[in-house]
């Protein structure tokens, strides 16, 4: 994974950068865990993360920075039975809240997340709120808007 540069790209400043970038500063070699940073007053991370998992073990993740309104979207295949890839992704964002569909409430992914990120609020919402078609439409509109802004 590439380290994020300290210079914010123009598309990220405009709020339409949908590619994955790390929200942590480049050159930061401090390894922090959720419990270290969540208990710190004036914490730097202000992300709400929503994720979904399917039978093919594909995990979709959307992270919104509450300070800048930037949204980061990613999708990956979880090869680990311990959901280590998902936990690593969540650790990058150090979320204050994690939103999960209620259909996954009793699943291994939800249990792993709640045990690993005890200081993050876990919220369960109706599965019907996750809509791939509407998500694709929003992604397309934001991409078109970003392309127009870059011209």
Image: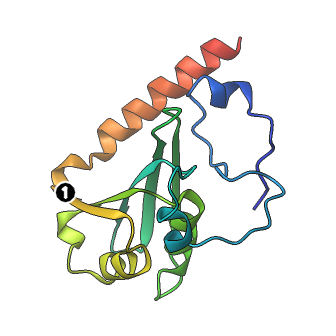
- Outermost residue, right side: 27
Residue pointed to by mark 1: 127
Above or below: residue 62 compared with residue 119 = above
User: Which quarter shows the N terminus?
Assistant: bottom right
Helix, strand or loop at label 1? It is: helix
Q: Residue at x 79, y 55 (%)?
A: 3
Q: Is residue 125 left or right of residue 51?
A: left
Q: Quadrant of residue 18?
A: top right
Measured as percent of width and height from the top left, residue 70 is found at: 53, 35
Q: Is residue 106 left or right of residue 74?
A: left
Measured as percent of width and height from the top left, residue 46 is found at: 48, 47
Above or below: residue 27 compared with residue 11 = below
- Outermost residue, front side: 41
User: Which quarter shows the C terminus?
Assistant: top right
Q: Residue at x 42, y 73 (%)?
A: 117
Q: Is residue 21 left or right of residue 40?
A: right
Measured as percent of width and height from the top left, residue 68 is found at: 53, 32
Query: Quick one: 133 or 72, which is closer to the camera?
Result: 72
- Outermost residue, bottom side: 81
Within 10 Å of disc 1 (Cα), the crowding (few <14, some 14-19, many 20+) is few
Q: Residue at x 46, y 58 (%)?
A: 95
Q: Quadrant of residue 110?
A: bottom left
Q: Residue at x 47, y 80 (%)?
A: 83
Measured as percent of width and height from the top left, residue 34 is found at: 51, 70
Query: Quick one: 87 or 136, which is closer to the camera?
Result: 87
């Amino acid at each position: 994974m590439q380290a994020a540069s300290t210079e914010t790209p123009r598309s990220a400043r405009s709020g339409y950068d949908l590619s994955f970038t790390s929200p942590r500063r480049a050159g930061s070699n401090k390894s922090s865990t959720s419990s270290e940073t969540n208990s710190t007053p004036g914490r730097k991370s202000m992300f709400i993360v929503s994720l979904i998992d399917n039978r093919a073990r594909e995990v979709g993740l959307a992270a919104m920075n509450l300070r800048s309104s930037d949204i980061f979207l990613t999708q990956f295949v979880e090869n680990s039975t311990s959901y280590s890839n998902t936990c690593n992704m969540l650790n990058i964002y150090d979320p204050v809240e994690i939103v999960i569909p209620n259909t996954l409430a009793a699943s291994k992914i939800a249990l792993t997340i709640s045990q690993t990120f005890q200081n993050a609020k876990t919220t369960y919402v109706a599965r019907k709120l996750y809509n791939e078609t509407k998500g694709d439409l929003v992604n397309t509109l934001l991409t078109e808007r970003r392309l127009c802004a870059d011209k």
